[in-house]
Image: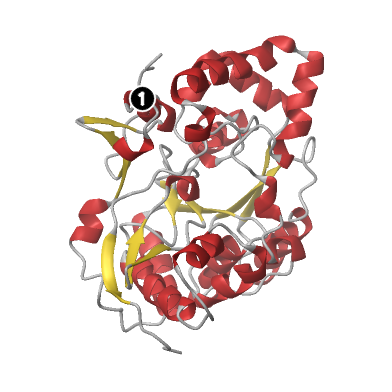
């Protein structure tokens, strides 16, 4: 059950197991026999290896965000921002407004047939305000993510769904790595876009390790499932303006060092969206405040577990369990086959990149 490569190979972002490379997380787990220590996430290593990560860029984070907007406009003919109610994509929209660079399209996912998304009113308000006050030519696109899309996806892919780039054990398949290839609305939209298109996602805040008194930067795959194996652009972490990532790394380190009793465990709790620290963490790396309370305190994040108990997924899973057992069985059979080989615990473990050493922990630095 090794599976074939699906969706093409991305030289910038992929998994490595010995001499094998793949964009499929689950194929990597099979190649490693379930031992995640044998898997490394290659995430633009060639970019970080050729930057002085120890040196903080002199530009402000806003200046670097504006630079990213300008470079995206220069590189692409059509800019589509995938908007949520959260800190990352709302900050991107704010950056385009501040820089005066126009967005051609704002897109959002509507999963209301099975998930009551509290962010939708805030998304629509932000999108219509942008269209009204900043760019009347901007298109607003609603991507309908419903039972029919999900059922059709499992029908077409069969048990090979498990080898798709970005696949997790969550039954719903609304992340970019799926909808950009399999949602008929989205695929048609992409194919009919004039010129070279960029689908922009708010990826992602830097991940840090604090080990033996030193700060390290790394990348974890679950934070980047939206861009893994898909033709999309991560705004905050990309090879277009890599210094934006470096700036955020230094800003995050300084903020962590202001926290009483900060240590390795607390850093990782925060980076796993600990609600008590979530707002502070986002603001520390230059994100703007957001209006949706469930987004501001990471409540929405908790709805998207990487397993079939995910809140966003349970209703649609129950629907197919009751109405179309064949779809339910396609999901369950692939999951059973893989977990019997690699273990379900390993399926839920984050896979990390190499670590890049940045600087010593600055005791008492404010």
Crowding around mark 1 (Cα neighbors within 10 Å: few <14, some 14 to 19, many 20+) is some
Q: Which residue is mark 1?
A: 33
User: Camera-side residue: 207 or 167?
Assistant: 207
Q: Position of residue 350 (x, y in %)?
A: 46, 44
Where is residue 318? Give x, y as percent.
78, 25
- Regarding residue 261, the answer to whether it shows in the image is yes
Residue in the image at 50% along x and 74% along y: 100
16, above or below 130, in the image = above
* Residue 251 vertical position relative to residue 106 in the rendered view, above or below: below
Q: Residue at x 52, y 57 (%)?
A: 202
User: Is 206 rendered above or below residue 195?
Assistant: below
Between 136 and 221, the one lying in front of the other is 221
Q: Residue at x 54, y 34 (%)?
A: 168
Where residue 342 appears, as percent x and y from the top left, is 44, 24
Identify the element where label 1 is drawn: loop
- Give the percent coordinates (x, y) of residue 1: 41, 13
Work out which residue is located at the far top of the displayed protein and give it. 326
Drawn side of residue 257 relative to residue 45, left or right:
right
In which image quadrant can residue 39 be found? top left
Residue 225 to residue 139: above or below: above
Residue under the image location 78 percent in, 41 percent down: 112
């Amino acid at each position: 059950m090794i599976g074939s490569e699906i969706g093409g190979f991305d030289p910038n972002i992929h998994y490595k197991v010995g001499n094998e490379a793949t964009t499929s997380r689950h194929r990597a787990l099979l190649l490693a026999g379930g031992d995640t220590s044998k898997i490394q996430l290659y995430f633009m290593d060639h970019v970080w290896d050729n930057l002085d990560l120890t040196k903080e860029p002199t530009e402000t984070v806003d200046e670097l965000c504006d630079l990213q907007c300008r470079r995206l406009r220069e590189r692409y003919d059509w800019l589509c921002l995938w908007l949520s109610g959260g800190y990352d994509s709302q900050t991107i929209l704010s950056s385009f407004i501040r820089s005066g660079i126009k967005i051609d399209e704002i897109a959002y996912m509507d999963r209301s047939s099975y998930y009551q998304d509290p962010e939708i009113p805030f998304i629509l308000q932000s999108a219509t305000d942008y269209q009204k006050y900043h760019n009347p030519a901007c298109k607003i696109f609603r991507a309908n993510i419903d039972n029919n899309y999900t059922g059709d996806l499992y029908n077409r892919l069969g048990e090979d769904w498990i080898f798709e780039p970005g696949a997790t054990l969550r039954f719903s398949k609304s992340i970019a790595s799926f909808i950009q290839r399999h949602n008929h609305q989205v695929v048609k939209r992409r194919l009919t876009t004039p010129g070279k298109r960029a689908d922009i996602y708010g990826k992602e805040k830097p991940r840090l390790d604090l080990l033996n008194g030193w700060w390290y930067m790394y990348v974890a795959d679950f934070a980047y499932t939206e861009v893994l194996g898909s033709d999309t652009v991560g705004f905050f972490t990309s090879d277009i303006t890599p210094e934006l990532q470096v700036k955020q790394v230094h800003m995050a380190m300084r903020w962590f060092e202001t926290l009483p009793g900060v240590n390795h465990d607390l850093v990782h709790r925060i980076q796993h969206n600990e609600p008590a620290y979530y707002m502070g963490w986002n603001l520390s790396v230059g994100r703007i405040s957001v209006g949706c309370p469930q987004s501001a305190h990471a409540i929405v994040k908790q709805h998207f577990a990487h397993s079939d108990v995910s809140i966003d997924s349970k209703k649609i899973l129950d629907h197919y369990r009751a109405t179309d057992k064949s779809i339910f069985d396609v999901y369950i059979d692939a999951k059973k086959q893989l977990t019997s080989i690699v273990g379900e615990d390993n399926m839920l473990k984050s896979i990390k990149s190499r670590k890049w050493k940045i600087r010593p922990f600055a005791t008492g630095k404010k």
